[in-house]
Amino acid sequence: MRDAEEKVLRKIDETQVVNLTRRIARVLSQTGHEEEMAEVFVDELKSLGFQTEILEVTRHRPNVIARLKGSKEGYSLLFNGHLDGGRKTPLPGWTKEPYGGELCDGKIYGEFVRDMKGGNAAMLMAMNALKEADLELKGDVTLALTIGHAEHGLGVEQLVEKKVTSDLAIIGEPTQMNVCITHRAWIDMELTTRGLPTAYHTTTADKGVNAIEKMSKLIVAMNGVKWKRPKVPTEVERLYPNQTCYWNIGTVEGGFEGWNSKSIVPNYCKAGLNVRPMYGKDYDEMLGEMNEIIAQVKSSDPNVEATLDYVPGFPLDYLYIPSSSPLVKASSESIRHGNGKAPDLVKYDWTTDGGILQRRAKMKVVVWGPCEALYTPLGPDEFITVKELMGATKSYALAATKISTRNKHDFDRAYK
């Protein structure tokens, strides 16, 4: 490691990192109610000597921004994490206090401490170590903690609109400290079936068209969608060997409009669908493939009347950055030295706000952070270990140092 990197690592204080993580673990920060969490981060940043910027996205819902200024000779770097994550009622089964921030046997317990309170704390303390090392920075380093991740990246959309962007970005979502170079898009859709405008009773149900029954027929048929594979780089094809699109029906509602009766044949049914296409899949092509299934069902049952539409605000874009990118190589080296283990280059089947930054701001984006990726539900007694937390903090600090203390030519040459 270079002298600058060793100097930054010496400025990381484990007690500070742990205390901050425990502090934010005590805060409930549901989507739509992120203000208290934002205030905690603003207070922490100010106490550490950062100048902060508070950008209100909607009433009482601010993004929090902190910057270290560079000379503009190097690449600028953005650390990004979302502030929202929490439930009004914690999952049953906790043996610890869900919002107690308890430290026990090297573990900090708390709801959403994996996704992504721990990562946010690590990124902030990495920036603080860089500041305390008092190095000459060639590029700006920015921390942006944003609201509305679960509202199709509402806070990150504002970052782009306000031009709080950079050349490079690291999204601190949980990846078990592997480097995610590609992930799926997130698309919400609404499938609607219609019956007849006449209200038929149970005793005359044979004269009506039951919109819920028609929906059931369509849902079964949708399992037969044939997704066309997109043409993608070889390494993306290798990472997605099987499923082109995942899809799920998350909500269903129906009835007869204007009535609340189980004895009336329903004339509408709405199903909320979530689709996760792999990188490169054309969204309109995907919609067309689903509409083909609807057409097939209609051809066999002329009473099926159905429409399929995007939910406003979607899609959240997929992400891809080539493994040959200097940002990927610098991230991998930083994790190897900071976390003590060489990372894998991986794909993930969930979605981050990084796709917005890549598509709208033309930034180069990677995703990596502490804790296991979220293939399993966040359950009771969720925790992050101090070891995970410190490995992430050191790795983020090293990445920021490698990027921000070199001019662009030297960085590209070091990681070509």
Image: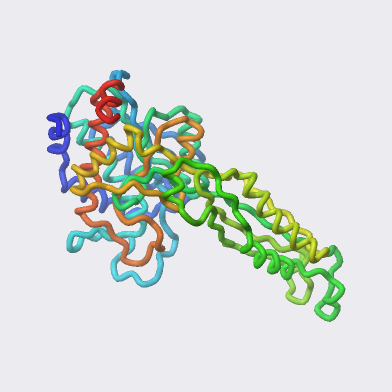
Rendered-image quadrant of the C terminus? top left
The correct choice, above or below, for 207 with respect to 142 in the image is below
Q: Quick one: 319 or 370, which is closer to the camera?
A: 319
Residue at the image point whose x is 64% and y is 44% from the top: 284
Indicate the position of residue 359 as horizontal and vertical percent values: 50, 35
Residue at position x 42%, y 51% in the image: 348
Using residue 334 as the reference point, say whether residue 346 is left or right of it: right
| Quadrant of the image occupied by residue 336 | top left
Where does residue 308 sit, x and y in percent of width and height? 69, 53
Q: Is residue 149 visible?
A: yes
| Horizontal and vertical percent position of residue 80 | 37, 39
| Residue 1 percent location from the top left of the image | 15, 34
Residue drawn at x 30%, y 71% as measured from the top left: 95
Residue 399 against residue 174 in the figure, above or below: above
Q: Is residue 37 left or right of residue 359?
A: left
Q: Taking 345 as reference, is 376 above or below it?
A: below
Residue 128 falls in image quadrant: top left
Q: How is the image coloured?
A: rainbow
Is residue 195 in sight in this rendering?
no
Residue at 33% across, 31% down: 77
